[in-house]
Image: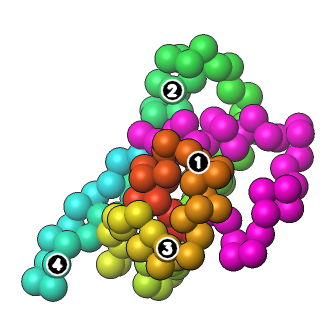
Amino acid sequence: MLGRGRDCDDIDVNPLTAHLVGWFTELNDSRRFTVVAGMSGGACIPKAISHQELLAWAQLSGTELTPWEVDALKEMDRSWRRAYGEKKGGSSSAGLQHQGLGDYCKGAEIEECRKVFGAQLDKICATCPN
């Protein structure tokens, strides 16, 4: 998830919006994928986080979302899916599929990511857009 050569201390998160990163991570953990089978193999295409999923998450977590937070989370979702598609082979969602631990970075960033994500690394790596 982190750029090559970047340290966690190098990442600036605005304290006024930092809570959105945690919320998005929770929502992304339950992301659904569309499985597409083809002659040359299969692909998993990430689905957008719907308003219904946002509402259910907010109710279950006891979070009161403001309209700007909903807009921000939806934009984060669009950006994540766009980056996922670009890293998986183009700007479209065609050819997207889950990856294994270190498949994208060829293992070069595993230890750096392990420090950040700990026990969740396998799950994070499976959908890493970076």
Disc 1 packing (10 Å; few <14; some 14–19; many ≥20): some
Which residue shows up at 54% across the image and 65% down it?
110
Q: Rounded to the nearest whole Å, what is the CA distance between mark 2 and mark 4?
A: 33 Å
Name the mark nearer the viewer: 1 or 2.
Answer: 1
In the image, the segment drawn in magenta is: 1-30
Give the residue type at disc 2. Trp
Q: Earlier in the sequence, mark 2 or mark 4?
A: 4
Q: Is residue 74 visible?
A: no
Toward the top, the furthest residue is 62
Disc 2 packing (10 Å; few <14; some 14–19; many ≥20): some
Which label number is shown at residue 117? 1
Give the residue type at disc 3. Gly
Q: Rounded to the nearest whole Å, what is the CA distance between mark 3 and mark 2?
A: 33 Å
Name the mark nearer the viewer: 3 or 4.
Answer: 3
Rendering coords of residue 75 (x, y %): 65, 54
Is 40 located above or below residue 109 in the figure?
Answer: below
User: Which residue carries the number 3 mark?
Assistant: 107
Which residue shows up at 75% across the image and 35% down it?
19
Q: Is residue 124 visible?
A: yes
Rendering coords of residue 26 (x, y %): 54, 36
User: Which residue carries the number 2 mark?
Assistant: 57
Toward the left, the furthest residue is 39
Q: Rounded to the nearest whole Å, what is the CA distance between mark 1 and mark 3?
A: 15 Å
Determine contact: label 3, label 4, CB under 8 Å. Answer: no
Q: Rounded to the nearest whole Å, what is the CA distance between mark 1 and mark 4?
A: 30 Å
- Which element type, helix, strand or loop, lies under badge 4? strand
Which label number is shown at residue 78? none
Q: Is residue 17 found inside the magenta-colored segment of the image?
A: yes
- Which element type, helix, strand or loop, lies under badge 1? helix
Name the mark nearer the viewer: 2 or 4.
Answer: 4
Which label number is shown at residue 41? 4
Number of marks in the rendered image: 4
